[in-house]
Image (tube, rainbow, N blue to C red):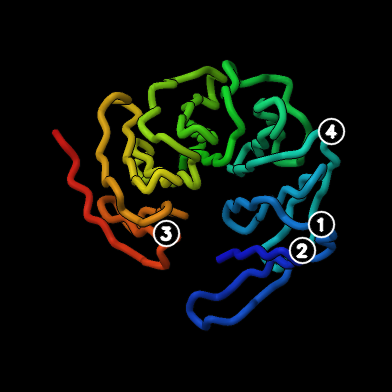
Amino acid sequence: MLTMSLVSHTPTWSLVEGTEIANLQNLEKQPIQTSSYKDTVAVITDGELSLYSASGKLEKSVKLSFTPSAVSISAKYVIVANAATFELKIFDSSLSPVSKALEPKPRSKVTALEVSPNGKYLAAGDSTGKINLYDLEEFSIVTSRWSFHTSKINTIDWNTDNEHVVSSSLDTNLIVYSVSRPARTIKALNTHKEGVNGAVWLNEDEIASVGTDACLKFWKVTFSQ
């Protein structure tokens, strides 16, 4: 598990022991967001993208010509969102820029990025509550119809089926979206007072969520046929 703080301190923790097992080295600026894939952690700070090992060792770092707002890492790519232009900048696993672009770009500041477990899809949620779904193999838009939130997307998490995502939002709602049926949603409304801070899949049909109300809740999802 990764945590971040306002003092440029990003430790990793053992969920079994409950103790800190590593601390990211050479982190001179406050982290904006982190993303992990297996034993690699991507960290964005103001004007910089860095990759760390699970032990906290700095593996690679590149300067950014923009301030980033969100990051997601997969086996093949590291995707970073530009906070000012909303463009999605793609790097390969060695942090070399990829010339291909994802179009159309989001219309508002990207606040959450998440690549599907199989690496095929990228979900990009923004400050207005809209999510764009991209195909990372074709570098094309799959759908821009995931727009049922009314405020900032805080987190996006993929189901292991690579078909469903759950999104948490400042609007207090949880929404499960489907890749193959983009207009069909499963909604849990007013789940946390003053906003949902995060939601993750525990397994294929169970979700855990946390909110500003200091509550941890668990949800059973029933998919329609």
Residue 29 shows which numbered tag? 1
Give the labeled residue for mark 3: 211
- Residue at figure coordinates x 35%, y 59% from the top left: 208
Inter-mark Cα distance, 3 to 4: 34 Å
Q: Position of residue 22 (x, y in %)?
A: 69, 73
Which mark is nearer the camera, 3 or 4?
3
173 vs 134: above or below: below
Q: Find residue 158 and report its horizontal and vertical position in percent.
A: 41, 44
Asked if residue 28 lies left or right of residue 205, the reply is right
Q: Secondary structure at mark 2?
A: loop
For image coordinates 42% across by 52% down, the residue present is 195
Name the front one of labels 3 and 1.
3
Looking at the rendered structure, the kind of residue marked 4 is: Ser
Secondary structure of the residue carrying numbered label 3: strand
Observer-nearest residue: 22 or 59?
22
The amino acid on which the numbered mark 1 sits, given as a three-letter code, is Lys
Pointer 4 with pointer 2, Cβ within 8 A: no
State the mark number for residue 8. 2
Mark toward the start of the polypeptide (1 vs 2): 2
Which residue bears the numbered disc 4? 65
